[in-house]
Image (spheres, rainbow, N blue to C red):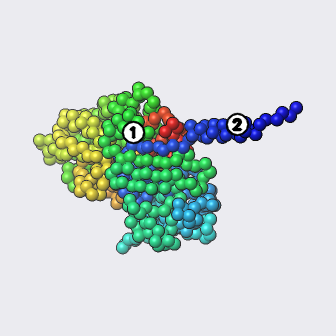
Amino acid sequence: MYRHIPRGLVILAVMVLLLGSLFAAQAQGGGTLRVGMVAPQVLDPALGSNDPEVLLNRAQYDYLVDVLPDKSLAPNLATDWTISDDGLTYTFTLADGVTFTDGAPFTAADVVYTFNRLCALNSPALALLNGGYFAVSAPDDRTAVFTLTTEPCFPTEDPVLMTEAFPNADFLYGVADRFALIVRDASLAPDAPGSDGDVNSTGPFVGTGPFVLTDYREGERATLTRNENYWKAGQPALDGLELIFINDPITQVDALRSGQVDFIFKISPEQVAVLEGESGITVLQQATNQHPVVRLRVDQGPGQDERVRRAFKLATDREQLNELVLEGRGIIGNNNPIGPGFGTFYSEDTEEPGYDPAAACALLVEAGYPDGLTMTLQTINVLGYDQLATVLQQQWAEGCINVDIQVNEEGFYYSDDNPNNWLQAELGITGWGDRPVPQGYLTQAYITGGIYNETHWSDPELDELVAQAGITTDQAARADIYHQIADIFAARGPIIVPWFAPIFGAVRDNVQGLTMAPFPGLTDLRTVSVSGG
């Protein structure tokens, strides 16, 4: 039977339902995520390399292809792609209906501009982009084509020409490289921010990303607001993002505990123990290939002598380092960057010298240092590397190696403004983050002329093997090449890799949907929300 209900009660009931839905939606999502992190130094998305720089840029720009935390590839601005039978041509279909934050439509011309700009800047991205031997074109607005070539795309006075083009086993990872964020074609908008090539706090490039930078205070914070016209439905879930620059890692932990920030990453092992019992905070852990590189320059100073390099290895007790510094959480490294996380590419059979400080002393005498060796060890104040330096100092003293320790803030140590930065120091510890494929390390840091070759090492046999690995698609054959590379590092390499470590972060319990990436700067914040904030 129909029963009459007064109109006022109907309106009241509807209002209650609507308010209930609104409050429920607010409880489930939205909010502003506050991230405590080291201040970025390089804001150009084609050049910014460390975690804070990548996190800031990923918030504003998008990749054609995403690398997921499990190292697999997923469509993003490129909805799908095909590879030609000869492995030389990659054709990408682009998402439709995407706009930049200034309202301009995203087209293949922006892809061409972005990757040509990577070439012009000789960006580190080229290491996985076939070493820069490629060309990119736009046959129409929704199609971008990459062709592997015999000529380099980057400017050089004396270009090296290849006799023929070869397939590249990791080219897709180059397209998805952390530097390869898509920016608007500045040639189509000469007055757009960043069109003069200057990327700073007042003029970022225009992106299609989930957030828009609204305020940047150098050394203090960056404020970003949600892109209301973002092309992925329902994203981002957050209303805003606040990146608070805190260079001291202990102060970051204190800020999280006091509720001043919601998320921090790259926590040192001793601070993990502090946070594990903290109410309202969850410690995050990701298995990674992240590792410290203890390295000598080989183009000058004592590191030129292979006997000195071997003495450093003999004077280093990697098992003890893992126990004392990482509390046993790491996997012992065998002094090359290809860790067990890469499966069959990792060499379990490579023999490394055990801890033998007396043998280290004897080698130094043989190398012309009868009274031992004295050097300065440069390190950084994150990930426990300052503690690592202290334990190394104690171990090395038994092996006739005496070092003074200089601890640097992370941003300063990696800054081009530092005349004794990580690329210049004779003896240093460098933190190498996770990479999806081994070539990411080898081509950037260990081949002759690699953009991040901090040891200044040049080994023709290594160069040849790395080049072979890049064009070898058969996984068993590729594994054999990487095992040969491991043997070269063991025989004459200038680095010590004491461990491969998980990466730690921490998040407040009112944050939902956050999965920290193995390279934390690549953490995808599009589906993250904060409740009760």
The percent coordinates of residue 190 (x first, y second) are 47, 73
Callout 1: helix, strand or loop?
loop
Q: Mark 1 or mark 2: which comes first in sequence? A: 2
Viewer-nearest residue: 388 or 335: 388
The percent coordinates of residue 54 (x first, y second) are 43, 52
Viewer-nearest residue: 168 or 283: 283
The percent coordinates of residue 234 (x first, y second) are 61, 48
Question: Identity of the amino acid at label 1?
Answer: Gln
**Residue at the limit of the structure toward the left, as seen here:** 371
Q: Does residue 463 appear in the picture of this structure?
A: no
Question: Identity of the amino acid at label 2?
Answer: Ala
Residue behind mark 2: 13
Q: Which mark is residue 488?
A: none
Q: Residue at x 43, y 36 (%)?
A: 506
Alpha-carbon span between mark 1 and mark 2 = 39 Å
Q: Which of the image's four quarters has the N terminus?
A: top right
Viewer-nearest residue: 211 or 350: 211
Asked if residue 378 is positioned above or below residue 504 in the image, the reply reads: below
Q: Nearer the viewer, mark 1 or mark 2?
A: 2
Is 471 on the left-hand or right-hand side of 221? right
Is 374 on the left-hand or right-hand side of 455? left
Residue behind mark 1: 260
Q: Is disc 2 surrounded by few (<14), some (14 to 19) or many (20+) residues within 10 Å?
A: few
Q: Is disc 1 surrounded by few (<14), some (14 to 19) or many (20+) residues within 10 Å?
A: some
The percent coordinates of residue 132 (x first, y second) are 45, 64
